[in-house]
Amino acid sequence: MVNKSKILSDLSKIAVDAMGTFSSLKKEIETLVSLRVNKVINKMNLVKRDEFDVFKKMVQKMAAENEKTQKKKKKPKLKKKKSLKSKKKPKN
């Protein structure tokens, strides 16, 4: 009986040590993957979210100003009417 309990005790210690090892291994793998992903992102020269939002607002503002400018150009200008006398040809 003592032999069986010693074996079970040893197995439980091994299991606890294995869980600790796997936990450390998991953290190490997460760190390596995170570093690799960040390296790839940096090589791709991607834009950060906050920079993108600022740029998006600038583009929206410029688009609104462009629309206003286009509307101003489309407004018809009032032309001065010429007198009817100057348009008529003299009769021969």
Image (cartoon, rainbow, N blue to C red):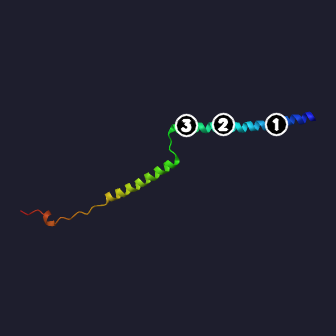
In this rendering, is residue 26 above or below 87? above
The residue carrying pointer 3 sits among few (fewer than 14), some (14 to 19) or many (20 or more) residues within 10 Å by Cα, namely few
Amino acid at the residue labelled 2: Ile
**Between tags 1 and 3, which lies in front?**
1
Determine whether the residue tagged by mark 2 lies in a helix, strand or loop.
helix
Q: Which mark is residue 30?
A: none
Report the amino acid beneath label 3.
Val
Disc 3 designates what residue?
40
Pick the residue in front: 59 or 77.
59
Q: Quadrant of residue 77?
A: bottom left
- Do the residues under discs 2 and 1 have CB atoms within 8 angstroms? no
Q: Position of residue 57 (x, y in %)?
A: 46, 53
Q: Quadrant of the C terminus?
A: bottom left
Residue 65: where, in percent of width, then height? 38, 56
The earlier-in-sequence mark between 3 and 2 is 2
Specify which label sits upstream in the sequence, 2 or 1. Answer: 1
Give the amino acid type for the residue marked by disc 1 in the picture.
Lys
Graded by Cα atoms within 10 Å as few (under 14), some (14 to 19) or many (20 or more), the crowding at tag 2 reads: few
Where is mark 1, residue-wise? 13
How far across and down, in percent of the image, does residue 7 sit? 87, 34
* Farthest-out residue, left: 92
- Residues at discs 1 and 3 in contact (Cβ within 8 Å): no
Q: CA distance from mark 2 to mark 1?
A: 24 Å
Residue at x 66% of width, y 36% of height: 29
Disc 3 and disc 2 in contact, CB within 8 angstroms: no
80 with respect to 34 (left or right) = left
How much space separates mark 1 and mark 3, taking CA atoms?
Answer: 41 Å
Q: The N terminus lies in which quarter of the figure?
A: top right
- Residue 29, which numbered label? 2
